[in-house]
């Protein structure tokens, strides 16, 4: 049976919106999007995997159509929630995890905390140190912090649409290569999903959560095979994180692709998942 549906699951009173595609009996591939994004950011990857796998792309709590967590966001909290979700699916086989940027950090954290659940990983420009590029830290993070007050401060709530437009104008050059293959229609769909009103708090909490979850000294503990794809033009997650992977993670197959960023592409490399769209 072939799956093509969107559905809500409930894990410990937390609703999780997911998109499922592919073979109902296939091995599970869990797709985890990045910061300020949604499941749709990984839809190009789903198109390549759904013929042979059961693809499950999640909206992390606070993004897309998933409501935010009651407690403050941390990367381990996301990882543990997804681990409970995986166990609840009833398939005893270890899964494949595809993670993009912050989703890659969550995937690695999940693997470290719940290694029995994971067979292998495919990571696209994963956040490792939590220390993002100078561009992001200088121009985007201050606006992200201001967005956080949109929930509790009525004045800033009124200004939130202006913050979002400013964030978009700053993130567009950080997210897409000069000759990107992302269509304008896809770009606007991604922005609509990622910039829903009221998400300012979770964006700010996730930004801090990444900075507090440096994985550099833990990569050597992972004994799972991984394919890691990095865009050479990525100016969001710095290439120094790729160097850490090359040095510390013996099981990782690191591929650095020229003229490509984490979120846009000039071409789709053969036999590799395409670079994804969306911020982080």
Image: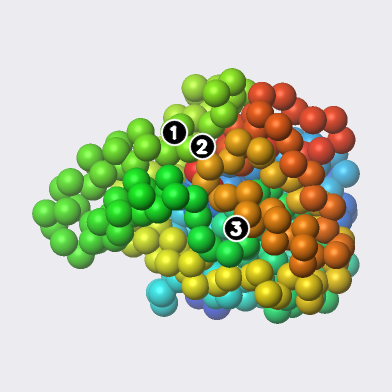
Badge 3 marks a residue whose secondary structure is loop
Residue 200 rendering spot, x and y as whole percentages:
33, 56
Q: Is residue 123 above or below residue 112?
A: above
Q: CA distance from mark 1 to mark 3?
A: 19 Å
Q: CA distance from mark 3 to mark 2?
A: 15 Å
Residue 157 rendering spot, x and y as whole percentages:
19, 52
Residue 127: numbered disc: 3
Badge 1 marks a residue whose secondary structure is helix
Q: Quadrant of the N terminus?
A: top right
Reading the image, the residue beneath label 2 is: 175
The disc, 1 or 3, on the residue closer to the chain's N-terminal end is 3
The disc, 3 or 2, on the residue closer to the chain's N-terminal end is 3
Specify whether 52 is left or right of 45.
right
Seen as rendered, the residue at the extreme left is: 155
Badge 2 marks a residue whose secondary structure is helix
Q: Are marks 1 and 2 in contact (CB under 8 Å)?
A: yes
Q: Nearer the viewer, residue 23 or 158?
A: 158
Residue 138 rendering spot, x and y as whole percentages:
36, 50
Q: Are marks 3 and 2 in contact (CB under 8 Å)?
A: no
Residue 210 rendering spot, x and y as whole percentages:
51, 65
Reading the image, the residue beneath label 1 is: 172
- Identify the residue at horizontal 74%, vertical 70% (top origin): 219
Q: CA distance from mark 1 to mark 2?
A: 5 Å
- Identify the residue at horizontal 60%, vertical 32% (top origin): 264
- Identify the residue at horizontal 85%, vertical 65% (top origin): 250
Q: Is residue 125 above or below residue 203?
A: above
Q: Decide if residue 38 is in sight here.
A: no
Label 2 neighbourhood size at 10 Å, few (<14), some (14-19), many (20+)? many
Q: Nearer the viewer, residue 1 or 90?
A: 90
């Amino acid at each position: 049976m072939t799956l093509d549906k969107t559905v809500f699951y409930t894990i410990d009173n937390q609703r999780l919106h997911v998109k499922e595609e592919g073979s109902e009996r296939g091995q599970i591939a869990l797709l985890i999007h990045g910061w300020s994004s949604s499941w749709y950011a990984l839809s190009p990857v789903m198109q390549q995997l759904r013929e042979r796998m059961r693809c499950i792309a999640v909206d992390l709590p606070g993004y897309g159509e998933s409501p935010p967590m009651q407690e403050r966001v941390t990367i381990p909290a996301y990882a543990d929630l997804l681990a409970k979700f995986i166990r609840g699916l009833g398939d005893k086989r270890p899964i494949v995890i595809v993670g993009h940027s912050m989703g890659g950090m969550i995937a690695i954290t999940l693997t470290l905390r719940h290694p029995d659940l994971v067979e292998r990983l495919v990571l696209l420009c994963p956040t490792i140190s939590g220390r993002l590029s100078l561009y992001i830290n200088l121009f985007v993070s201050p606006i992200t912090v201001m967005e956080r007050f949109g929930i509790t401060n009525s004045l800033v709530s009124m200004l939130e649409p202006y913050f979002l437009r400013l964030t978009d104008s700053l993130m567009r050059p950080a997210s897409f290569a000069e000759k990107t293959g992302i269509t304008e229609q896809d770009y606007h769909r991604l922005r609509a999903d990622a910039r829903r009103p009221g998400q300012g708090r979770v964006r700010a909490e996730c930004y801090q959560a990444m900075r507090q979850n440096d994985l550099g000294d833990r990569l050597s503990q992972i004994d799972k095979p991984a394919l890691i794809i990095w865009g050479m033009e990525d100016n969001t997650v710095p290439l120094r994180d790729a160097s850490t992977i090359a040095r510390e993670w013996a099981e990782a197959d690191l591929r650095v692709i020229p003229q490509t960023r984490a979120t846009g592409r000039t071409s789709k490399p053969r036999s590799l998942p395409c670079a994804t769209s969306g911020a982080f």
